[in-house]
Image: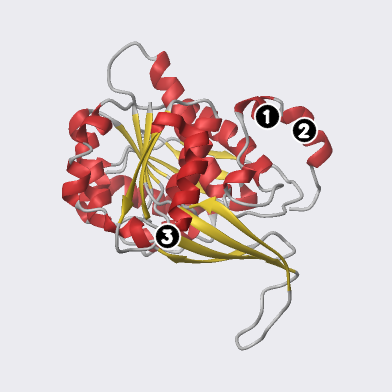
């Protein structure tokens, strides 16, 4: 089982031909309210990829919260452990998507930032019965750190997607089995440039020295770079498709990686799971296909594919591929 502790938002999505400059007004083309939040997105992605998934999150006692709860019940049934919190709003993300599918996002955390170390400690039984714990950084850092510590104590495999980018406490690194930064997050975490492949490798090795066991660095259209616990390195290319909206591409990728890690752990009879470079590549290849499908669809959770769609990726890609990189 995968447990995801993270954010739940209502995404307010505006599409426009181009983003306005400072002080400029442009006309939008469309507006939608769509379920989002990195925690919820990654949980939905993992569940649609075929993993038994529990989502733990919080919403406000308001209309957005009521609407989100009904929607997530359809995705998870009893697998959604979502609390309503009085006195704070449901988290909101204001998302502007331009004609090239590039997005600009502003997040108002609301109920997502009410998690405390004590409230995470109360979740220990849920974490303990999981194979994989998947986290992001849209809940308070203290809550993330406590979640990692509990998972480490209970022998649960931990995946941290360090987004939005933020410095991590020094003692958190040794609790992370798999870290999944993008290029800019890798640079922020290390203070090193990451514009070239050698720079990306050097930055990843720095995080290894801090205690992280394995890394997957996502590089957008250039694919992913993975480094296992033995510091073996492999590059996995991306697929070139006609992107409409990249809002949830990273969340889709992380949820799909978590799903494949969970499957590998289920296949392993006993002992501590430490994925080899080949196993990481297997997870990345599956997740890259899932993310490629997601960017051809609008919205966060509506864009996330189901496993049967990913398994038919090769036929789908024939119609969707583009030569533009």
Residue at the top extreme, as displayed: 269
Q: Earlier in the sequence, mark 3 or mark 1?
A: 3
Residue at x 29% of width, y 58% of height: 86
Q: Which residue is mark 2?
A: 316
Q: Earlier in the sequence, mark 2 or mark 1?
A: 1
Q: Is residue 256 visible?
A: no
**Nearer to us in this view, 184 or 116:** 116
Quarter of the rendering containing residue 138: bottom left
Q: Which residue is mark 1?
A: 309
Residue at x 22% of width, y 45% of height: 120
How far from the left and from the top, in percent, is residue 258?
Answer: 45, 33
**Marker disc for residue 198:** none
Q: Residues within 10 Å of mark 3 (few under 14, many from 20)?
A: many
Are dots 3 and 1 in contact, CB under 8 Å? no
Q: Which residue is mark 3?
A: 91
- Left or right placement of residue 190 versus residue 47 in this view: left
SS for dot 2: helix
SS for dot 3: strand
């Amino acid at each position: 089982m995968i447990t995801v502790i993270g954010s739940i938002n209502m995404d307010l999505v505006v599409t426009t031909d181009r983003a306005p400059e400072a002080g400029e007004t442009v006309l939008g083309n469309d507006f939608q309210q769509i379920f989002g939040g990195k925690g919820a997105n990654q949980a939905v992605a993992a569940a649609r990829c075929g993993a038994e998934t529990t989502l733990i999150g919080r919403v406000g006692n308001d209309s957005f919260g009521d609407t989100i709860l009904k929607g997530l019940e359809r995705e998870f049934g009893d697998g959604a452990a979502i609390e309503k919190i009085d006195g704070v709003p449901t988290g909101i993300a204001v998302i502007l998507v331009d004609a090239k599918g590039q997005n600009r996002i502003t997040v108002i955390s609301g109920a997502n930032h009410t998690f405390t170390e004590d409230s995470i400690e109360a979740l220990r039984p849920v974490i303990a019965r999981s194979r994989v714990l998947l986290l992001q950084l849209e809940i308070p850092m203290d809550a993330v750190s406590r979640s990692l510590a509990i998972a480490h104590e209970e022998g649960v495999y931990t995946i941290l997607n360090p987004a939005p980018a933020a410095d991590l406490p020094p003692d958190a690194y040794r609790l992370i089995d798999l870290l999944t930064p993008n290029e800019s997050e890798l640079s922020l975490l290390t203070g090193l440039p990451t514009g070239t492949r050698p720079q990306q490798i050097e930055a990843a090795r720095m995080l290894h020295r801090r205690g992280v066991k394995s890394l997957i660095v996502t590089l957008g259209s250039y694919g992913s770079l993975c480094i296992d616990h033995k510091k073996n390195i492999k590059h996995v290319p991306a697929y070139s498709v006609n992107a409409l909206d990249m809002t949830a591409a990273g969340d889709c990728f992380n949820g799909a990686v978590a799903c494949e890690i969970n499957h590998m752990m289920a296949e392993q009879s006993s002992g501590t799971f430490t994925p080899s470079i080949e196993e990481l590549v297997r997870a990345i290849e599956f997740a890259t296909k899932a993310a490629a499908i997601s960017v051809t669809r609008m919205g966060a959770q509506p864009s996330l594919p189901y496993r049967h769609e990913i398994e038919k990726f090769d036929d789908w890609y024939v119609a969707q591929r583009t030569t533009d990189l």
